[in-house]
Amino acid sequence: MDRSFAVVELPSLSQTVHSPTITELNAKNNKASEIVVAWFGGSREGSADVNIYLTKAPTGQINPDTWIQPRSILTRALVEQAFGQRNLKLGNPLLQTTPEGSLLLFFVTTSYGGWSCSHINLTYSEDHGDSWSPPRRIITSPFADFSTLVRNPGTWLKDGSLGLPIYHEFLNKHAEWLRIGKDFRVLTKARIPSSQPALQPSVVPLTEDLAVGALRDAGSDQKIQWAFTKDKGQTWQRGAARQVPNPDSAAAMIRLSDGSLLLAANPTPKHRHILKLLRSYDRGESWSAIRTIEESNDPNIEFSYPALIQDSRGKIHLVYSYLRKSIRHATFTMRWLNENTEDNVPSP
Amino acid sequence: MKSHSTLFIRLVTSVIVLSLLIIPLNGISLWRYGYGLTGELSPTLLMVALFWFFRPTSFASWIGKEISGFNLIILTSLFLGIYWTTLIERGDWDLYSWGFQPWEILFFLGLFVILRGRDYPGITLILTIDLSSYGLHLLASDNLLDYLFDPILTLVFLVTLFKRLALLFRNRLRALTTQAESGFRN
């Protein structure tokens, strides 16, 4: 395991934390650019005391001391009050910045049942996350808006709308692509097909029209599933599963400044005890494991739910759930990624 | 006189039901539990409920004449068998994706109102309310299909369909019995 990169354990206010999300806010209204991280935490996943927490640090000066004390920005009671309906669980926060510099926070809630009964909701902040709008529902399903979730960030399109990768879990698992207008109204929805049941699409645009998506395998293939669009997300086609093992766990993919793709995933067929960075120079056709971020001999140990960004200064940020006890934030440079890579394709 | 007493019973029932719904359970009123399960209901269902409550005769006329048994079967199976099945099944497309920018649906609904609206005043009225609500973005949903129908409305269709089939079956049975009885006499 390579430890020649900076890792910070973000301060945690709860017993269990999971599903971190990260974004960069550009300088606005006398506020410097900041890296913002959010996650959900409580006594256990899905419990009544789960809140969504947020912390941030100035982009260029990240060290253990510059992260502000995390604060709860969403509670179950607040969501219940806002929607006037029962709310059972709170989870999967997703931070997304707008081109104008606002901060969006998508998150999922359930009124009944497990995560497969989730709805997507949205709240936003105009002041770098200091205050938040009342949450609103994004209705994407006619089953009483049943079973739609979000995990990975979206892409801003030329017409000002946001293309957001989402997924459906009830009875069958499949990914979808939602286009949301500037007023947060849903404009279109398209199915992202895959040869296996798949979840949590991570979509990266390659050209103005072409985008590729890496999907968590929820079937029997145990490999990263793949899909692509050639018409800005209007229609999607399934691609062959990549030769990257996936134990039904979340993966995050970004396009780096040199055009290559970077994937953070658990490239093992069964467990989440290894977290690696993989890189592709051919638009996702082939992948090489380049760095090991976390590794344990105990398969019950879990390093999971990675989220990636490359900030305005070129630095790459990775956040992930460490044993579901803390959120870790790792930073590295392009140079570090390019040097002395492991250069081995993970064996299926 | 009879209609007044029916209206009174319905009013009392509604007041009791509404009172029960505001009873808190674990700090949340019961209707919020229901709302959490159903989400927003379509204007169609609300219109049907209003018809049923205030104008039972018009409701019976609308549901009886404008939606024939055949149309009811089509509507119920469309919603149950195709609409929600395509939504959850594996595949590349679901009908709901048709609903956010539904110029095709809007075109056909408009055409229906122009060509057949006079023959179907109840449906035309409901469609007018649905499309106006959609135009005014009155629901949280942006999808036209959510303004036209919902799972509860499908259940209403299903119950109505079963009632009709039961009635049809009973009438057939009665006719057969009468025929058999007349046969014995001959």
Image: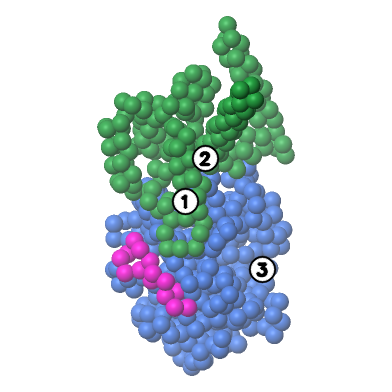
Chain colours: A blue, B green
Viewport quadrant of the C terminus of chain A: bottom right
The answer to whether marks 3 and 1 mark residues whose Cβ atoms lie closer than 8 Å is: no
Amino acid type of the residue tagged 3 in the rendering: Arg
Nearest-to-viewer mark from 3 and 1: 1
The relative height of residue A274 versus residue A196 in the rendered view (above or below) is: below
Q: Residue furthest top?
A: B1
Instruction: Please rate how many residues cluster around mark 3, counting C-alpha atoms within 10 Å: few if below 14, some from 14 to 19, many from 20.
Output: many
Q: Tell me the quarter of the picture where residue B146 sits.
A: top left
**Residues indicated by labels 2 and 3 sit on the same polypeptide chain:** no
For the record, the magenta segment spans: A226-241
Q: In the rendering, at what x and y percent does residue B169 appear?
A: 58, 33
**In this view of the protein, can residue A61 be seen by the observer?**
no
Q: In the rendering, at what x and y percent does residue A244 appear?
A: 52, 82
The residue singled out by tag 2 in the image is B154
Amino acid type of the residue tagged 2 in the rendering: Thr
In front of the other: A245 or B73: B73
Looking at the rendered structure, the secondary structure element under dot 1 is helix
In this picture, residue B110 sits left or right of residue B130:
left
Q: In the rendering, at what x and y percent does residue A33 appear?
A: 42, 64
Residue A41: in magenta span: no
The residue singled out by tag 3 in the image is A324
Subunit under mark 1: B
Instruction: Please rate how many residues cluster around mark 2, counting C-alpha atoms within 10 Å: few if below 14, some from 14 to 19, many from 20.
Output: some
**Distance CA(mark 1)–CA(mark 2):** 12 Å
In this picture, residue A24 sits left or right of residue A41:
left
